[in-house]
Image (cartoon, rainbow, N blue to C red):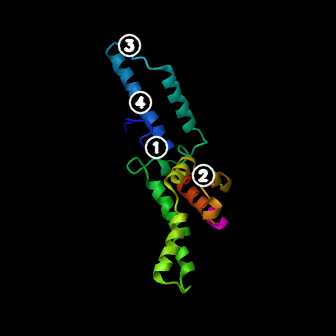
Amino acid sequence: MKILDAGSAAMSNMEVLLWIEEKRAQHSAEDAEARAAKAKPRPRPKNFMDALKKHQRVLKSKQYPYDQNPDAYSNKTDKYASMRQLDEKICEEIIYPLEEGYKGNGMKSDELEASLGKEQEAKELTETEHLMIHNLAPKCLEQFQPIIENLDERYTAEEQEKIVEAINSVYRCNEAA
């Protein structure tokens, strides 16, 4: 991965951690080459190296779920697999059951589609919400609530609990229950 322009794309914390680890491995390889050539390793800015160490330490801490849940975060060929899996669980538990509530209420097909479509769209997670959930993997409702915009308007209390359960099953799959 090569970052050409800061802010050009959103990266998850896991992607940042992988980039830091790749950068540190690159520095180690360059230093080893320099030592093998009996040359002095190239100096690097101290503040940059300190920032790499600090961010790597923070992102590897227990505050973030990456090291404790490798099954959810270590898929290097498909880094969005966990996000898709969460989406599927939310669809199964929340979005698809909405159709049952609209059946047999006497609405015309186009009215039904418009009403159902609006409600289903409101229940889908935004890209930003997905990224925040991916980064933080909230364990409980109290951690989940600040992540979702208009939470109480979009989801019932039961739906909120179902989403938190889905998050735990996807992003905290390796942790003891």
Q: Earlier in the sequence, mark 2 or mark 1?
A: 1
Q: Amino acid at mark 2?
A: Ile
* Residue bearing the label numbered 4: 25
Q: Quadrant of the C terminus?
A: bottom right
Tell me whether the residue at label 2 lies in contact with that at label 1, contact meaning CB atoms closer than 8 angstroms. no
Q: Residue 113 versus residue 90: which sits nearer the camera?
A: 113
Identify the element where label 2 is drawn: helix
Amino acid marked by disc 1: Met
Q: Position of residue 140 (x, y in %)?
A: 65, 55
Classify mark 1: helix, strand or loop. loop
Left or right: where does residue 129 sit relative to residue 42? right
Q: CA distance from mark 3 to mark 2?
A: 48 Å
| Residue at image location 52% in from the left, 74% down from the top | 115
Q: Residue at x 63, y 62 (%)?
A: 160
Label 4 vs label 3: CA separation? 18 Å
Q: Tell me where the magenta segment starts and ends, as one range.
A: 156-161
What is the secondary structure assignment of the residue under circle 4? helix
Label located before the other in sequence (4 or 1): 1
* Residue indicated by mark 3: 40
Say whether disc 3 or disc 1 marks the residue closer to the N-terminus: 1
Mark 4 belongs to which amino acid?
Answer: Ala
The residue singled out by tag 1 in the image is 11
Q: Is residue 14 visible?
A: yes
Q: For marks 3 and 1, give the CA distance.
A: 34 Å
Per the model, the C-alpha gap separating discs 4 and 1 is 20 Å
Q: State the separation of the CA atoms marked 2 and 1.
A: 17 Å
The residue carrying mark 2 is 147
**Is 126 situated above or below 8?**
below
Are the residues tagged 3 and 1 within 8 Å (C-beta)? no
